[in-house]
Image (cartoon, rainbow, N blue to C red):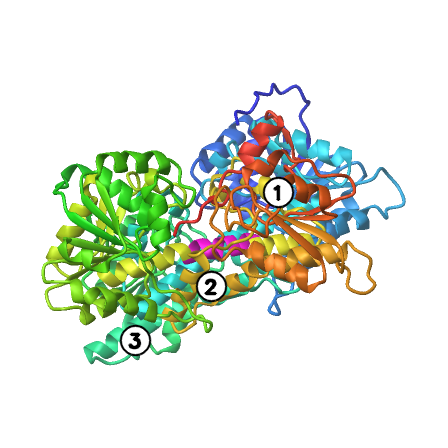
Amino acid sequence: MVPMKRKRSLPPLRVAVIGASRAGLPLALLLAERGHHVVLVETDAEALDTLKSGKYPFLEPGGPELLQACIDKESLQISSRLSVIEGSDVILLTCTTPIDTRLIPDMSHVDAAIRDLKPHLRGGETLVFRATVFPGTSEKIEERLSQRSVGPRIGVSFCPERLAMGHTVKELTEVPQIISGSSPQALSHAARLFDPLSVDLVELTLLEAEVATLFLNAWRYVSFGTANQFFHIAASKGLDFDKIRSAIVYRYERASGFPRSGFTAGPRLYQDMMQLAAYCRHTFSLGHAAMLVNETMPDCLVEQARQKLLEQGTRGFKGLKCGILGMAFKPDSDDCSDSLALKLRDLLLREGAEVRCADAFVQEREGMELVSQSALLESSEAIFIGCPHSQYSSISFRQAVFDCWGLVREPDFTLFQATSLDCRALRVAVVGGAGHVGLPLSLVLAERGHEVVVVDEDAQKLAEIQAGRIPFLETGGPELLQRCLESKAITFTSQVKEVSSSDVIIVTIGTPVNEHLNPCFSVVQACMDELTPHLHPGQTLLLRSTLFPGTSSRVLASLPAGVNVSFCPERIAQGKALEELTDLPQIISGSNQQALEHAKALFAPFKVDLIQLELQEAEVAKLFLNAWRYVAFGTANQFYHIATSKGLNFDRLRAAIVYRYPRASGFPRSGFTAGPCLFKDTMQLAAYCRHTFSLGHAAMLVNETMPDALVEQAKAGRPASGMALSGVRCGILGMAFKANNDDWRESLAFKLRRLLLWEGAQVSCSDVHMHREEFIPLDQLLASSEVLFLGCPHEEYREISIQPHQRLYDCWGFFESPKLAIQGARSDRSSLEEESRRGARSPIPSC
């Protein structure tokens, strides 16, 4: 969406900014530079003298220059007296509601600020809260101020600061600003306040703006927590998480938001996540799970060091000279607020270590002596990376280094670029080749020059394919199948013995999970038992579907001597396989060099880059990717639960969060998270770490109960007596597990149907892409249903009409477009819908 340019025609405001904080000072300077009459109130005498001398108090690119410009032009008044705020139109507060030791929001900071301001308020002003506050705080303050017996009403506005520390000056004129107000005048004041910054303004209610801010920071906290839990898992298995992550994200769009591991700290993410948890009475299970992971990252480094010392047979921590490099909470910053490097220091001191600390940007810290970088490196026997400032990347360490950030060394996977690959043709057999994974791969292999035989025990499917019909939706599939049949580039058989003449046998059978949520190896073993009599030395068995880590090595041990094993995970979006097979990088691995050469030759004609990992690394990479996406969707779904329970529209909040905001580009929509991969792979990863994957389990409980949430909403909308849905004619629109596809495997729409039947409802189902005997046509379902549920958001449903007497329950945010007032942008519906969908869940999960 291209915003409309606005000419500033509004008169400047008289603005008071309370406190020269990291949030308040840059904004005060920029507002003054852009024409408002600004007074900055700072009651700390030392900080006041620092500002008046022209010295910027913290690290902020562009800040010192902006401060000097305001001093030179006398465009900013700086004072220690609160009385100077009298006569202001807007009073901007940067105080927040932190969390106390019992994880309850602490209102004392806000209460103290209002108490101090009250004697100087004359009426008609607007108090603008800038820092995060507990939901409902703005309304409570407005109500308290409205009890004044004299003077015009005082307005309250919440306009959250969503800027990256250290980039505030730059981002203030780039990032859209959310505004809200308790009255039309308060909203007008907020709009006029930010008008000179020339950014789009997104209007929400006070409560919506407060909750949206918590959703954003809580989502980021959980996302970082997921990466950190993967780091824990990888480290416990002797694997390099940073190497695996680099292989996952390399030119792979669906992993573009996959974060690095590291200390997740600072003055906002943890506090805001816990405020959201308190808001929903601590039912935010994903947030609590993320907290336990993120807060124990320093413990993880200490345990790694302990294990290393044991392996070396040296003494323990007592008397060990340890250096912590970097004490700030984030790279290239001088802010130590809530830094976990401080916790790391405390843990090492408790172990009896001699600890020294250094930081490239922090000059001094109360209660802690900081030494120079050179002195720390010279005197330390072990180095811990507390904060990976960019200048540390060039250091050559002579000591043992413990680092959860991936700073110390570059990931060392081997990359084969598409232009350098040999295109030797192979004889290939694809076992399970009539399925969603096997058939598209077989067709592309055949079209690109390999000699392919499809092996599948389902004779009916094979006959259908040979007749030119693909048994499922696949873009471009029918046309490619027809070309392959005409050229006779592919053959079909139900006889397993045909694999004996192949160079490579591709197996598309994975390891499912059983009723105990543990991997079921018997399916793979049964396939191996059937193939083994027809295998001979020199062949490579290439495993394609998700495997429990260690399965490839286990398969290798069970095969005849000389048969190789390769694992090359399929990461293709179902329904888009033909396009993505020749576009996305391919991870390859092999038990020996011949297996690797076979894998390279197999995928070389696809003209995609190949990423080489070890067998178990490749297996874990597939699980990490799908588990990360499952947790991300679970977080959005938990936000949906929270918003709904508070009477808020999650889709509207999400649209405001993601609007032209890069750090929310991966923020997914809510909806049913199902299918044959994400849940199963998350549970396999959980089993791999002996079910200590707390974030995965929390996500499962959220995602699997989305149908229950819709049923409970429907019951709440019915009379309270008896079984609310008994005898009610209910219709489910869409039964596939994902949009615009015909695959129903593990679809939660079927769970929704069972729940409705259990409630005594009369249930009808329809799907525009699936044809089953018990389904009815769409028009019949619409005509006969009193209550409608969206089971799968196929695009064909976009234009259907819901009758006034019908109730529709939709957790996807599909039917109702978010209605946001955006100043400075085109507000036409199609543009807003397109913008709000940025970062939405991929319509087709990778499998």
Of residues 22 and 415, the one nearer the viewer is: 415
- Residue 457: mark: none
Residue 623 visible within the image: yes
Going from N to C along the chain, the mark reached first, 1 or 3, is: 3
Nearer mark to the viewer, of 1 and 3: 1
Badge 2 amino acid? Gly
Residue 323 lies within the magenta run: no
Q: Position of residue 77 (x, y in %)?
A: 61, 34
Would residue 267 appear left or right of 688 to someone viewing this image?
right
Q: Position of residue 632 (x, y in %)?
A: 48, 53
Badge 1 amino acid? Pro
Residue 43 visible within the image: no
- Residue 696: mark: 2
Q: Position of residue 545 (x, y in %)?
A: 32, 57
Structural crowding at the residue carrying mark 1, measured as other residues with C-alpha within 10 Å and reported as few (<14), some (14–19) or many (≥20): few
Going from N to C along the chain, the mark reached first, 1 or 2, is: 2
- Residue 777: mark: 1
Q: Secondary structure at mark 3?
A: helix
Badge 3 amino acid? Arg
Structural crowding at the residue carrying mark 3, measured as other residues with C-alpha within 10 Å and reported as few (<14), some (14–19) or many (≥20): some
Q: Position of residue 155 (x, y in %)?
A: 76, 40
Q: Secondary structure at mark 1?
A: loop
Structural crowding at the residue carrying mark 2, measured as other residues with C-alpha within 10 Å and reported as few (<14), some (14–19) or many (≥20): many
- The magenta-colored residue range is 627-636
Nearer mark to the viewer, of 3 and 2: 2
Nearer mark to the viewer, of 1 and 2: 1
- Residue 306: mark: 3
> Distance of mark 1 from mark 3, alpha carbons?
65 Å
Residue located at (45% from left, 52% from top)? 335
